[in-house]
Every structure is written in structure tokens, then in C-alpha cells.
Image (cartoon, helix red, strand yellow):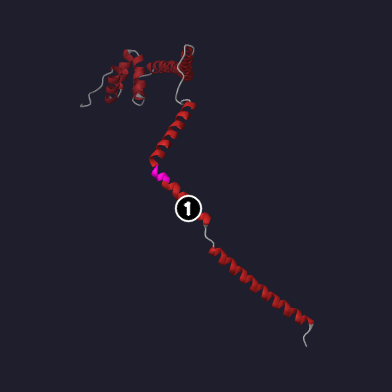
Amino acid sequence: MKTGYDQFFKKAKQTATAQSRTEKVRSLRRKTKEKSRFPLFQFALFLMFGVAGFIALENIDEIENQWKKIDISMSSAYAQDTPPVDAKPAPTAETVPAVTEAKKTADDSDYLFKLAERKKVLDQREEDLNRLAAEIEKQKNEIEEKIKKIEETRSKISSVLEEKIKTDDAKVDTLVQMYSNMKPQQVAKVFETLDEDLVIDILSRMKKKVAGDILNLVKPEKAQVFAERFTGYRTPASQ
């Protein structure tokens, strides 16, 4: 037994099928009409461009001449409106002194700059010389101070030596007096053992007779040495 719902769905299905068929038929007719139409607009446009191209080919020389005239006219107009870029105004009576003055000022500035640089160099040299002179003066003072100390030391040494010489002379004089009062035999034995320089110094201060008596009692080899030293005579090495 069919219900109302079944009948409703059946009618809806039939209606949808009929509408689908109707739409397909309309679409097919529309495509057929579009194919059967002739492209009048496209054909007219193509024909117009073709005629224009043919006319241009027939009158190509005249068109080129007209175009050159237009180009020359536009170039002349542009040249008249545009001032020359590289053109410089001619110097006038007022500008010439100004230019000369400016050049003179530039030359003066350059000269002053070079003069200032030269002054810097000279100032630096003067500073170096002053520093060198100060260093030399310092070294000179140090050397003079050292020389002064050396002279003082030398003076002290000389004083000590003189004092020592005086003391030694006094001692030698004492020995001379002492040995002169002794017997020649005793003095001869002492002289054989004393330092030769001291013996010569003592003999040189004694009286000649006393010195001769003592030398006569000294051993011959010692007496020869004392005599040679006393007279300043030296025996040759070959002997």
C-alpha cells in the first residue's frame, strides 16, 4: 500500500527529470545559435586596419617627410626654450676685479698656511735644540762635579803621601843616625838581610867614609849589588 509520502517523492523525481531535460535542450539550442552567427565586428575591424595599412604603404615617402618636419619643429622649439647648459656669462668690468681679488686672497691664504707650517717646523727644531742643550749642560755639570771630586781625592792622596814620605824620611834619618853610631861589622850583617832599596836610601844619607867602611865588610856579591844600585849602574844581561 503506497503512502502519501511515496507519491510525493515520485512526483518530485519526475519533475526534476523533466526540468533537467528542458535545461539540456535550451543549452544545446544556445550553442547552435552562437556557432551560426557571423563575426561582423571583428571582420569590419580587420578590414579597416587592412585599408589603412595599404594607404600607408602607398604614401610611405610623404609620411616620412611629414614626420621629419614635425620632429625638426619640435627640436627647434625645445632648443629655443632651453638655455645652453655649458654657456658661461662673459666676464664684465665688475666681475674681473672680484675674480682677481679672490685669486689674490686664495694665494695669500696658501702663503700664510705654508708660513704657519714652516713656523711649526722651526719651533719644533728650536725645542729639540733647547732640550739637547739642556742635556749637554746637565752632563757638563755632572762631569765637572766628578772632576772636582777626583781633584779632591787626589789632593787628599797627595797629602797622605807627602805625610808618609815625611814620616818615612824621618824614620830613615833615624836609622841613618842609629847605624852610623854602630860598629861597621854589625851594620854590614844587618844590611845583608835588609831590603835593598832601604839599604841604598840609608847609604845615600850616610857620610861617605862610614858608608865605605860598611860596604867593605859586606859580602862581595851583596857589596857589588849595593854599589851598582847606589851609583845607578846596571850590569848587562849577557854578563
Residue 47 spot, x, y in % from top left: 47, 52
Q: Residue furthest left?
A: 238
Q: Quadrant of residue 162?
A: top left
- For residue 10, above or below residue 77: below
* Residue that numbered label 1 is attached to: 46
* Residue 142 visible, this angle: no
Q: How many marks?
A: 1
Please report the bounds of the magenta region as a residue range.
55-59
- Residue 138 position, x and y percent, is 49, 19
Residue 132, position as x, y percentages in the image: 46, 20
Which quadrant does the C terminus fall into? top left
Q: Say which amino acid is labelled 1.
A: Phe
Relative to residue 6, is residue 107 drawn left or right?
left
Give 84 or 129, whichever is nearer the viewer: 84
**Residue at 70% in and 78% down:** 14
Q: Is residue 4 visible?
A: yes
Of residues 92 and 84, the one nearer the viewer is 84
Q: Position of residue 107 (x, y in %)?
A: 45, 16
By secondary structure, the bulk of the magenta-drawn segment is best described as: helix
Residue 175 covered by magenta stretch: no
Q: Residue placed at 23% from the left, 26% from the top?
A: 237
Q: Residue at x 59, y 66 (%)?
A: 30
Residue 177 in the image: above or below residue 40: above
Q: Secondary structure at mark 1?
A: helix
Q: Quadrant of residue 11?
A: bottom right
Callout 1 crowding tier (Cα within 10 Å): few <14, some 14–19, many ≥20 = few
